[in-house]
Amino acid sequence: MITTLSSFRRHMSPIGHEVRRLGLRMIGTILTALVLLVVIGPVPAARALDIRTLTSPQGIPFWLVQVSELPVVTVDFAFAGGTRIEPAAKAGAATLASGLLVEGAGDMDGPAFQDALAARAVEFSTGVDRDAFSGSFRSLATEAEEAAKLVGLALTAPRFDADDIERDRRQLLVSLARSAENPQAIASRSLLAGLFPTDSYGRDTDGTRETVAALTHEDLVAYVSRQFTRNRLTLGVVGDITPEAAGRVVDLAFAGLPAGDSRPKTDPVSPSFFGETVVDRPIPQTVITFALPGILRSDPDWFPAFVMNHILGGGTFTARLFREVRETRGLAYSVGTTLYPLDRAGLLYGYAATRNDRARETVQVIRDQIARFAEGGPTEAELAGAKNYLTGSFPLSLDGSGAVAGLLVTMQIHNLPPGYLDDRSSLIEAVTADDVKRVAKRLLDTDKLSVVMVGQPADGAGSAAPAAARISENGARSTAPDSTQ
């Protein structure tokens, strides 16, 4: 099976691609997976995972979990960088390169390379987001070394044949055209563009029609040459394989890469919170996205914020926003929030959708609930329920050998120790109501609430309200967001 993904790893997907592919309702699930690390297939429970920190014979560090239940090996990898290291004028190069990696390598053209993967039943996928270029390959244990050779060839000698570039370019341009008309994608893109107007985080990870149309073979080669280096690499291996054999697989796939420069700088960037913006579209329903200050995964307040988010909007049926917006008032079918920790910035991201004539009421209810939480914090019942869910659901989610390799990569990216899985429940249980209230006061500042509404939201009288900045059909902003808020 051959798979190409144009979004970051299963458990680390950002906002952009997922909006287009799965719709706004899925954003919370996808982004929460960064924290829950959802996986598929049989593996031991979280506390039974024996994580070994190893180094290959060629000096490449990796983490290993041996699983003997199935004769399968999975390797997940991530290169720090992603679309962040693209020049703005070359935006889209990372996404285009990602899709082309299975379209030939070395002396094998696309069909020959895909036949070689299929002959060994190798699954090989790649993807990119704002902070990393990631991938995974999986095979029977007996084919792991041959699979690694093929992946190593794709990483060190991608062909980027002209016909393949043009075909994938056309597909990407079609995707961009559809995205430009998709209210959910517009809302997400406009929110990030407003929050990060001068930073790469504010760009569409797929680039623009202009930049994609101008990309050349040389641009793709330049991107992967900078991106695919050992100094940017993080690795996780899971499967029926010994440490010695795993080291050989790692070297076959990655030792041929240059050492390269150091990892990209991670100096924090401050979002420019901008109030409200309307993107005018003649549709019967208004799609709403909103953001507040979040935190980095390394922040000491991560777990209080994690619990806070679950109570506010991350717990779906039990969350305050769900109860107040959907159940009590019937304003929206779906509403929620999620922590969105990027490498250099943190957001609390939210979403909803409702009729145009109730959009502003929906935003006001959301604003009121955020303010109420910031003032009063959680109830003891809410805190206990959140802890029970967040500790009880996590082991159940770790039921898959394939994506456990991704879990290992994620832990390394966020500098979590191998013993993190043993400590996670106790860290959550240690969160107090005062902790949650303190973090709520820190993060839930309604003066910084940034809202994008895509549609034609009306005030109570049925006419378009003037309070928000508006964006015309061509995307031009009529009022610039105030970054001083």
Image (cartoon, helix red, strand yellow):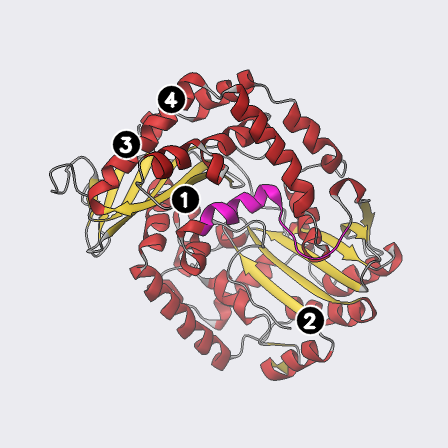
Q: Nearer the viewer, residue 383 or 481?
A: 383
Q: CA distance from mark 1 to mark 3?
A: 29 Å
**Residue 326, percent from left and from top:** 36, 39
**Residue 400, percent from left and from top:** 70, 54
The residue labelled by disc 2 is 153
Q: Nearer the viewer, residue 363 or 226?
A: 363
Mark 4 or mark 2, which is nearer to you?
Answer: 4
The residue labelled by disc 1 is 199
Q: Are marks 3 and 4 in contact (CB under 8 Å)?
A: no
The residue labelled by disc 3 is 364
Q: CA distance from mark 3 to mark 2?
A: 54 Å
Q: CA distance from mark 1 to mark 2?
A: 33 Å
Was residue 67 drawn as part of the magenta stretch in this picture?
no
Mark 4 or mark 1: which comes first in sequence? 1
The residue labelled by disc 4 is 372
Q: CA distance from mark 4 to mark 1?
A: 32 Å
Mark 4 or mark 2: which comes first in sequence? 2
Whether residue 114 sits left or right of residue 422 in the image: it is left
Whether residue 44 sits left or right of residue 224 in the image: it is right
Q: CA distance from mark 3 to mark 4?
A: 12 Å
Amino acid found under the numbered disc labelled 2: Leu
* Label 3: few (<14), some (14–19) or many (≥20) C-alpha neighbours in 10 Å: few
Instruction: Give the magenta-colored segment's residue range.
Output: 26-43
* Label 4: few (<14), some (14–19) or many (≥20) C-alpha neighbours in 10 Å: some
- Please give the name of the residue rendered at 19% of the width and 48% of the height, measured from the top-left corner: 456
